[in-house]
Amino acid sequence: MKTIASIAQELEGYDPQALSASTVSSFLSRLVEPVTQHESVGIFQALGRVLSHDVISPISVPPHDNSAMDGYAFDGAQLSSQASLNLRVVGTALAGAAWPGRAGPGECVKIMTGAVLPQGLDTVVPQEFVTRDPLPRAGDGDCIAIPAGLLQAGDNRRRLGEDLMQGQPALQQGDLLTPAALGLLASLGIEQIPVLRRLRVAYFSTGDEILSLGQSPRAGAVFDSNRYTVFGLLTRLGCEVIDLGVVRDEPALLEAAFLRAAGQADAIITSGGVSVGEADYTKAMMKKLGDVAFWKIAMRPGRPMAVGRIGPSVLFGLPGNPVAVMVTFLAFVRPALLQMMGSTAKAPPLLRARSLEPLRKKPGRTEYQRGIVSTAASGALQVKTTGNQGSGVLSSMVQANGLIVLNHTQRDVAVGDPVDVMMFDGVI
Ligand code: AMP
Ligand code: MG
């Protein structure tokens, strides 16, 4: 485990009083380490978990060549571009019940989607392309005629192993188990999945003006909202959450909360009490108990942040303002927690959308504005802001479907200029 000082030394231009968003990301990626303990869980418990080992296909999917259509299977070597092909229907292959016979030249087999292709047959003509008529002599059955030039040999055949080949890696260690991944594992017949253990994250809110839900309102006090946004963000990420409540600004209470968190959590998230002018004891207690850096980040919202370790736990001391909490979580904490969870997933790409309004932006800091992205009549993406961008205006996070990310060097944005957007999809 690296100390804060040693990571700071590795980073060029590290200045805790003026850190760029990209330096914060580099710092955190050096600070955190993935969990290593793993367990085996049933497939219904595996959604959102991280694979601890590669999964090698025990079988091929599909296990046989089979038909992609309802139609007639035949040997495609008989096709010619000049003449239509007449074939006598000699049997039926149903999905789940292979046709055991052999069809020779001039013969075909009625086949259903997913049915195993009978031996020697490699091509399927969809039933809607042919008419089926009785042969002239009674008792000879039916025939079909395939027009010239309609098909090539191999058409409408799904090949053995075209999805997954036996012995090949199907999923890799570090993959997040999405609904699609669950389906893939099931297609391989795998019911028990090896996953890394869930990350345990403890969180609490600080500040004497913060009321817990259920307390009666009093002058100058506000209800705690940060614990609920943090709870939601962590739960969406698949973390085990440990809610330590609102902690009043008393050294003994703060110390007890930090020590309780450090004893059982991989990460601790606090909100409030880390800005420069803070009169309270939060910063002092972090300093006393851990190896912690106090930063001013060149960003808006969310300038102050404390980061480090208390005991074995990683500490993320977020600002108090409700929007700043969510933005710093999305920009920095979430990627760091994913790394701790052992996920190797890359951050989804930012979208580019045209701004529907002029945006004021000073170079030298990263700004995250709450945006509403929509599709213009032309089909291009466009974005407007939610209006008041105050860091306490939590309703802006509810209205928005993404964050407009105005990067460090960017200046004012004119109407029609393209801007980057981080979409909330599935995250918030
Ligand atoms: P601080 O970072 O402690 O100076 O707090 C900045 C602002 O955020 C203040 O207006 C606080 O009242 C507000 N705030 C801090 N913590 C919370 C919280 N848990 N829920 C809602 N607002 C908060
Ligand atoms: Mg405060």
Image: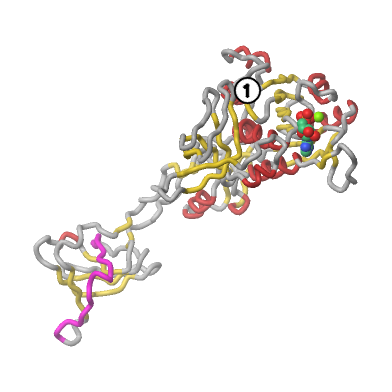
Pick the residue in front: 4 or 356.
356
Tell me the quarter of the image containing the N terminus.
Answer: top right
| Mark 1 crowdedness (10 Å alpha carbons): few <14, some 14-19, many ≥20 | many
Residue at 63 percent of width and 42 percent of height: 237
Residue at 20 percent of width and 85 percent of height: 139
Name the amino acid type tagged 1. Answer: Ala
State whether residue 391 is above or below residue 191: above
Q: Is residue 155 magenta?
A: no
- Horizontal side of 379 relative to 117 (left or right) equals right
Secondary structure at badge 1 equals: loop
- Horizontal side of 140 relative to 283 (left or right) equals left
Residue at 39 percent of width and 50 percent of height: 163
Q: Can residue 262 be seen in this view?
A: no
Q: Which range is magenta?
A: 120-137
State whether residue 65 is above or below residue 145: above
Quarter of image, ligand 1 = top right
The residue identified by callout 1 is 298
Q: Where is residue 363 in the image (x, y as percent from the top left)?
A: 55, 22
Of all residues, the one furthest to the left in this rendering is 82
Q: Does the magenta stretch include residue 123?
A: yes
